[in-house]
Image (cartoon, grey):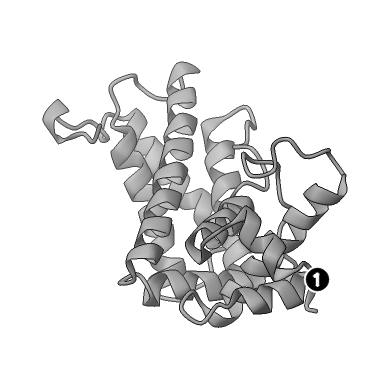
Amino acid sequence: MDRDSTPPPVRRSRRTEGTRVGGRAERVVAAVLSATHEELGRVGYGALRVEDVAARSGVAKTTIYRRWPTKAELVAASLRAANEEQEPPDTGSLRGDLLAVLMSAVRTCRTPTGRGVVRMLQTELADPEVEAIARALRDRNRRRHKALVERGIARGELPADVSTELILDLIFGGIHGRLIHRGEDVSEDYAAAMIDTVLAGARAGAARLPNEQQQP
């Protein structure tokens, strides 16, 4: 297997609570979620079969269904696990935090599995189950990213009245458009330049919105 296609390690979540760290139950969960992530990147949501996940993971189909009764639950759990490989960074600066998050996303999108998952989320978004999974992931990531900006504000790196929503839209929207919609790579220098530009504007007072225009 291509080294870049190796799925990220699975962190403990509510689905793995109550299992002994390093025990068989946790290894089973990790194997199933990693196999699901690989299959999702290979065939997408609609064509994903629990039988194929079972064969890839070496875990019985009945065991998988006991823990995740529906395909939607299984896929959501696998995407959460892939998304939770590490806690939000704390590099000591907002610039460093944002750059670490962006480059982590870029590295994921460079892998065959990452590209497949992104393609699935784009092409199968009309499926209500896929849309619900994608929305939950977006909301979770948005909360994490917002917390990074708020931490930067608390450290005095940005004015207290900046719009966190506008900052996030400019940075992540720009990178997302280049990486996903145009299919162009994003270098660390490019990401750093975008972050620097947006943060410089925010410090100069260009990231303020009337209260009624800010998202909750």
Q: Nearer the viewer, residue 12 or 94?
A: 12
Looking at the image, residue 191 lies above or below residue 58? above
Q: Nearer the viewer, residue 62 or 123?
A: 62
Q: Is residue 94 visible?
A: yes
Q: Position of residue 97 (x, y in %)?
A: 57, 37
Total residue callouts: 1
Image point (62%, 46%), residue name: 84
Mark 1 neighbour density, 10 Å: few (under 14) some (14–19) many (20 or more):
few
Q: Position of residue 59 (x, y in %)?
A: 77, 67
Q: Amino acid at mark 1?
A: Gly
Image point (65%, 32%), residue name: 91
What element does badge 1 sit on?
A: loop
User: In which quarter of the view is residue 52 placed?
Assistant: bottom right
Residue identifier under label 1: 58
Image point (31%, 38%), residue name: 165
Q: Nearer the viewer, residue 202 or 5?
A: 5
Looking at the image, residue 31 lies above or below residue 146? below
Q: In this image, 9 relative to 162: left or right?
A: right
Q: In this image, 95 relative to 128: left or right?
A: right
Q: Which image quadrant: the C terminus?
A: top left
